[in-house]
Amino acid sequence: MFSFLTNPLKHSCSLLSVILSLILAGISPVLAQVPKSLDSLETYVRTHTPTDTNYVIALNELGNQLTRKKADYDRADSVLHLAESIARRLNFGRGMYRANTNMGSNYYLSNRPQQTLESLRKAHTIAEAYKLDTRTIARALTNLGTAYRNAHQFEKSIEVYLRSLRMQEQYNLQPRNEDTYNGIGLALKDMHRTQEAISYFKQALTLNQALKNAYGIAICEQNIGKCYDDLEQPAKALSYYKSARSHAREAESELLQSDILVNTGLALRKAKRFDEARQAIEQALVISRKQENQSAMATDYFNLGQVYEEQKDYKLAERYMKQALSLANALDDKPKIAIYTQGLANLYGGMKDFQQAYVYQLERNQEIDSTTTVRTNAEVQRLITKYETEKKEAQIKLLRQEAQLRQQETQRTRLLLIGSVLLLLLVGVASAWLLNRSKLRRLEEAHRLRQQIAHDLHDEVGSTLSSISMLSGHTDTLLSQNKPESAQKMVQKIYTDARQILESVDEIIWTINPGNDSLHRIALRLQEYAQPLMEAKGIRFHFTVDPALANFLVSMEKRRNLYLIGKEGITNLIKYSQASEASVRFEQKDQQVRVLIEDNGQGFVQAQYSLRTGQTSMQQRAKAMGGSLEVRSAPKQGTRLVVTTFIN
């Protein structure tokens, strides 16, 4: 039914097959008595008395045209609510169905997903309650599937779409509803199952071609083009966009032409054909201005700014991006505000105006949840990293001071013990021997701890610091040779290495902290590591811990090995699984703890398990703590990793 663009920088009103769905929504009776043009409809509803079904039909058609031709969403909403009210009074089921379907279209295009879902759910209920024809009920299901997709409930969306398809097949409805195939394709595309999506889009294209429906053909071709764009095949994408635009012109849909032009511009920008990209987006902007569609204008301005940024024309880039942000603020469009402030932060970073970059970065961070903060331009992040590094250095300094104090306290304790031994020598040599033995064990433990910290700092930090030192010297050389782009890459590498050092030091501090001795603390640490990574990848994540584990303590070495195995397993899942759902469970049985990491991803052939996943290292760590590691996987059947070890 409706199109939903997954790229927030593209138009939010691509319409997809809105128009065709509404035309076929089913108002066959006495339609000839109702005018069809917008002006005639305005006159009709103004001059006729709202007493019959024709008036409801006219109101529905007027609301539909106000939505798709004028983008006057507020007035369309009022007209359609009036149509529903009169239809209910007349007990005109088809009119009520049509009003709610058109309201769903209106809410969809004005970016109100919850209201879209409510209206289309109601439309489906009305269609069944009034026993409307089977084709209308199947179409209502298709529309409802689109509403679920718009609300990001992709699995539910596909389930409802397939119900519609089964109904069409059961009753042999001909021709099949091409919007159903389009909807399944869009849901699959949103789930990153791009090749499957193309298959459904092509089935929808075949149906539209049979109907000679230029608008529907344009929609399908644009969707296929976007899939090839996602697959990094720009030549194929541009070919489909070109054909789609031709059919959109044939259908006389300016809004659809504008949408296709924006997608064309983005593909051309990817292909570094900046002049052509700019021309395509400027043509889209002309249409957006003509339609007075401020949301679309904001999108066009921002995309133009990004093209100019690629060409290093920073003045024009700044101008257009600020225009985009101004419009987004006027519309209070929070997702776009977040995107545009991030874009300006990146732009000022490229301009070496780090003060402005930092200002916009702070604005961006206020617009999004702290767990999903996106990494900005390398130079801007360098400012933040510098602060974080100084904070970690202060923590390390404090740790060293505490170690020195403990050493001094140990020395004082030694003197006191020696004095005590001398004083108590007469009491008994046995007591003195026991005290010395206890003291020696504590000193040995302290010595082993210091050795472990020194070893970890050398392995985790030493080599990386050396790398940073070498890269810093190379960066100075590149700058002196007037090679800023190469220097920028060196700075990015320095930033990555510095972040790695911070993470390593943080893990060392966490490992030696006696407050983290419980299994429950290990579980919380892994959850803190995994949650933002899963969210960034769009993976539904479930994390459960047996409450009984809060009562069990483990040694520092076992705690470190268990955490690192879990971290490695989660990292592999994020990098290679391509999963949509994953879980981590901590379970306790008898005197053993089991950690299970599972996903529904692409799996692998275990005999060909790659060394890059660190399986050998994980096996060694499991063996070192007296436990075991089991990995089960098969192609297309996900992966299951189980770590088992004794608690004591």
Image: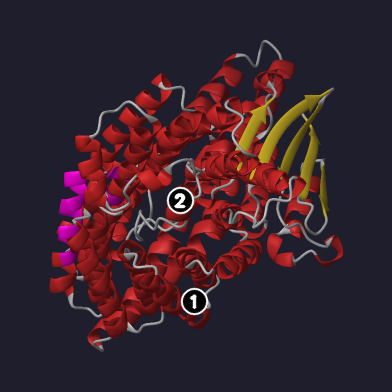
Image height of 352 relative to 641, above or below: below
The dominant secondary structure in magenta is helix
Dot 1: within a 10 Å radius of its alpha carbon, few (fewer than 14), some, or many (20 or more) residues? many
Which quadrant holds the C terminus?
Answer: top right
Dot 2: within a 10 Å radius of its alpha carbon, few (fewer than 14), some, or many (20 or more) residues? few
Closer to the camera in the image, 282 or 387: 282
Q: Is residue 217 left or right of residue 547?
A: left
- Tell me the number on the disc at residue 23: 2
Image height of 341 relative to 96, above or below: below
User: Of the residues under marks 1 and 2, which one precedes in the sequence?
Assistant: 2
Residue under the point 38% across and 38% down:
57
Q: Nearer the viewer, mark 1 or mark 2?
A: 2
Q: Position of residue 215 (x, y in %)?
A: 44, 65
Residue 487 in view, yes or no: yes
Residue 372 in view, yes or no: no
The residue that mark 1 highlights is: 240
Closer to the camera in the image, 224 or 330: 224
Highlighted range, magenta:
320-337
Label pair 1/2, CB-CB below 8 angstroms: no
Q: Position of residue 302 (x, y in %)?
A: 25, 63
Q: Amino acid at mark 2?
A: Ile
Q: Amino acid at mark 1?
A: Tyr
Residue under the point 57% across and 15% down:
423
Residue under the point 47% across and 64% down:
219
- Tell me the number on the disc at residue 310: none
Q: Position of residue 588 (x, y in %)?
A: 77, 25
Given the current orientation, which residue lies at the most extreme top position?
427
In magenta stretch: residue 327: yes
> Circle 2 — which element?
helix
Q: Quadrant of residue 185?
A: bottom right
